[in-house]
C-alpha cells in the first residue's frame, strides 16, 4: 500500500499536527483504550494482548507473533514478507498492513506496539505510541540522540506506559547467573569491566541512484537530513554510518552495556568522563564509522570504569563480550544478546544465605507481557535502555570531537563544552522531529 505522507490530512488532526513537538504533544489529551489502562479493564491474565509490529525487516520480522494484528513498514517488500510470516504464526490469518505508523496508533484495538525500525525512528514513534495509550517494546538502542532519550523517559512516565527495550541478554539464564555471581561479591569488588568486539566494517562502493519503487525513501529518512538513496546506506547497512547506526557500539554494544550495568547494579548511573580514540576507515567507501575504536568510561559514586575496545583482548573465540575484573577473580561473559554465555563457575554458583536475589526473567517478551498486565516495570525498562544508549552516543561523540568529554548526569549536558552540547539533539527535518 502507498505510504501516507505527513502533510496529508488525517483523521485526528489535532493529534497528528502537534505530536511532532514534544512539548506541545505532551500537553494533548491522551488517547488511551480502556483495555490497556492500569486499572480494572486492562488485559487480564488470560486475555490476549493485541500487537502491531512497526518496522518488519530483519529483526522486526522475527518479532511477529500469534498476537500480531497489524504490520507497518515503509518498504512494501518487507510488508509482503511480514504478511507471510504472520500467516505462519497465526495459522493463516491475513493481518492488516500500513505504510504510516500513525495509522496504526489510531487503532483502538491495538494494545501495544513493537518498534523495530532503524535507530533514528525509535524515539519519535515510541513517544507517539505512549501518547496514543500503547505499551511499547522498542528495539535497542533505545534512542538515537540524547534529547530523544529524555523525551522517551518523560513520555513513559507521563502516560503510564510499560516500555521494554530489546536488549534481551538480560533475559538469558547465563546473564542472570553472571549478575547473581557479581552482585553477591564472588569476584570481590569490581572496579573495571573490559568489553571487546570485532572491528567495524568498511565499504560502501555502490553509486547513489533512484530508490526502488517499493520503498518510500523520504519516509525512511524521516528526521535525518535528506540525502540521495544508496542501496548500501539503507536497511541493514545504515549501521556503518555515524549519522545513523554508528557502528557496532550502538548495535551489539547496546547488548553488552546492558549486561554490564545490570551486573554492576548501575542502571541509573551515567559515566562522568569519556575518552575515545579510533581509526577512520581507509577503503574510500561511503561507510564512515571507525574501523577500530577504544572508549574509556569513568563512573563516580562509586568509582569504576568500563572499557570498550574494537578489537580488544578477547575472552574467547566469540566476536564480542565482556570481562568483569574483581579484586579476587575475573568473570568472562561472551556475547551479551540472546546468545549470552558465561563461565561454569557462575552457572554453578549458589548465593549465600541472605545474599542478593536477582530477578530471573521468564523471557524478554514474556516479561513485557507480564508487566503489561501487572503495570510493573520490565527488566529492561526505558531508563535502563536510555542509560545504555547514552554510553553509546557519548562514546561516539568523544571519537568525533577527538577529545575527552565530561558529562553532568544531573543537568544532562556536557560540562563547559558548547560544541558537544550542540550534539545533544538533532535538528530534525520538516515535521520529522520531536
Image (cartoon, rainbow, N blue to C red):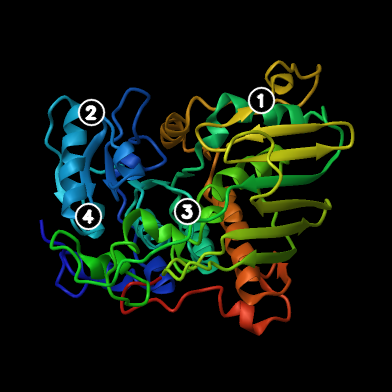
The residues bearing labels 4 and 2 have C-alpha atoms spaced at a distance of 24 Å
Q: Residue at x 60, y 44 (%)?
A: 256
The residue beneath circle 2 is: 89
Dot 2 or dot 1, earlier in sequence? 2
Q: Is residue 423 left or right of residue 234?
A: right
Are the residues at dot 3 and dot 4 in contact (C-beta closer than 8 Å)? no
The residues bearing labels 3 and 4 have C-alpha atoms spaced at a distance of 18 Å
Residue 30's place in the image compared with 186, above or below, is below
> Label 2's element?
helix
Are the residues at dot 4 and dot 1 in contact (C-beta closer than 8 Å)? no
Q: Which mark is residue 106?
A: 4
The residue beneath circle 3 is: 156
Query: Percent from the top left, x then y, of residue 359?
Result: 62, 28
Furthest residue to the right? 327
Q: Residue at x 47, y 53 (%)?
A: 156
Q: Residue at x 56, y 73 (%)?
A: 424
Query: Percent from the top left, x then y, of residue 59?
Result: 36, 43
The residue beneath circle 1 is: 177
- Kindly report which numbered mark, 4 or 1, lies closer to the viewer in this rendering: 1
Query: Percent from the top left, x then y, of residue 397?
Result: 61, 70
The residues bearing labels 2 and 3 have C-alpha atoms spaced at a distance of 30 Å
Are the residues at dot 2 and dot 1 in contact (C-beta closer than 8 Å)? no
Q: Residue at x 74, y 18 (%)?
A: 349
Amino acid at each position: 500500500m502507498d505510504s501516507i505522507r505527513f502533510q496529508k490530512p488525517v483523521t485526528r488532526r489535532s493529534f497528528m499536527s502537534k505530536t511532532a513537538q514534544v512539548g506541545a504533544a505532551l500537553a494533548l489529551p491522551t488517547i488511551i483504550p480502556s483495555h490497556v489502562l492500569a486499572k480494572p479493564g486492562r488485559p487480564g491474565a488470560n486475555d490476549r494482548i493485541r500487537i502491531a509490529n512497526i518496522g518488519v525487516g530483519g529483526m522486526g520480522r522475527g518479532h511477529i507473533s500469534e498476537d500480531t494484528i497489524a504490520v507497518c513498514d515503509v518498504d512494501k517488500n518487507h510488508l509482503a514478507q511480514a504478511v507471510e510470516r504472520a500467516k505462519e504464526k497465526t495459522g493463516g490469518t491475513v493481518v492488516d498492513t500500513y505504510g504510516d505508523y500513525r495509522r496504526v496508533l489510531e487503532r483502538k484495538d491495538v494494545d501495544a506496539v513493537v518498534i523495530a525500525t532503524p535507530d533514528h525512528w525509535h524515539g519519535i514513534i515510541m513517544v507517539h505510541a505512549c501518547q496514543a495509550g500503547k505499551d511499547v517494546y522498542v528495539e535497542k538502542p533505545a534512542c538515537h540522540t540524547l534529547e530523544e532519550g529524555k523525551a522517551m523517559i518523560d513520555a513513559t512516565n507521563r502516560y503510564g506506559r510499560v516500555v521494554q527495550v530489546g536488549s534481551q541478554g538480560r533475559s538469558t539464564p547465563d546473564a542472570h547467573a553472571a549478575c547473581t555471581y557479581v552482585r553477591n561479591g564472588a569476584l570481590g569488588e569490581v572496579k573495571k569491566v573490559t568489553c571487546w568486539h570485532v572491528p567495524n566494517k568498511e565499504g560502501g562502493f555502490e553509486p547513489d541512484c533512484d530508490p526502488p519503487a517499493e520503498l518510500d525513501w523520504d519516509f525512511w529518512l524521516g528526521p535525518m537530513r535528506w540525502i540521495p538513496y544508496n542501496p548500501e546506506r539503507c536497511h541493514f547497512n545504515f549501521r556503518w554510518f555515524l549519522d545513523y547506526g554508528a557502528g557496532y557500539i550502538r548495535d551489539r554494544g547496546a547488548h553488552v552495556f546492558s549486561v554490564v550495568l545490570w551486573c554492576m547494579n548501575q542502571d541509573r548511573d551515567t559515566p562522568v568522563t569519556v575518552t575515545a580514540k579510533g581509526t577512520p576507515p581507509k577503503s574510500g567507501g561511503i561507510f564512515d564509522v571507525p574501523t577500530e575504536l577504544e572508549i574509556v568510561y569513568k563512573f563516580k559514586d562509586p568509582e569504576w570504569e568500563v572499557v570498550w575496545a574494537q578489537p580488544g583482548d578477547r575472552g574467547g573465540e566469540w566476536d564480542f563480550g565482556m570481562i568483569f575484573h574483581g579484586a579476587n577473580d575475573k568473570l568472562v561473559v561472551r556475547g551479551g544478546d540472546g546468545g549470552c554465555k558465561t563461565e561454569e563457575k557462575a552457572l554453578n554458583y549458589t548465593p549465600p544465605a541472605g545474599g542478593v536475589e536477582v530477578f530471573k526473567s521468564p523471557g524478554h517478551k514474556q516479561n513485557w507481557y507480564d508487566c503489561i498486565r501487572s503495570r510493573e516495570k520490565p527488566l529492561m525498562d526505558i531508563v535502563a535502555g536510555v542509560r545504555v544508549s547514552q554510553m553509546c552516543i557519548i562514546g561516539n561523540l568523544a571519537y568525533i570531537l577527538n577529545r575527552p568529554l565530561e558529562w553532568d548526569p544531573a543537568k544532562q549536558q556536557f560540562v563547559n563544552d558548547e560544541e558537544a552540547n550542540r550534539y545533544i539533539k538533532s535538528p530534525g527535518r520538516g515535521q520529522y522531529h520531536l
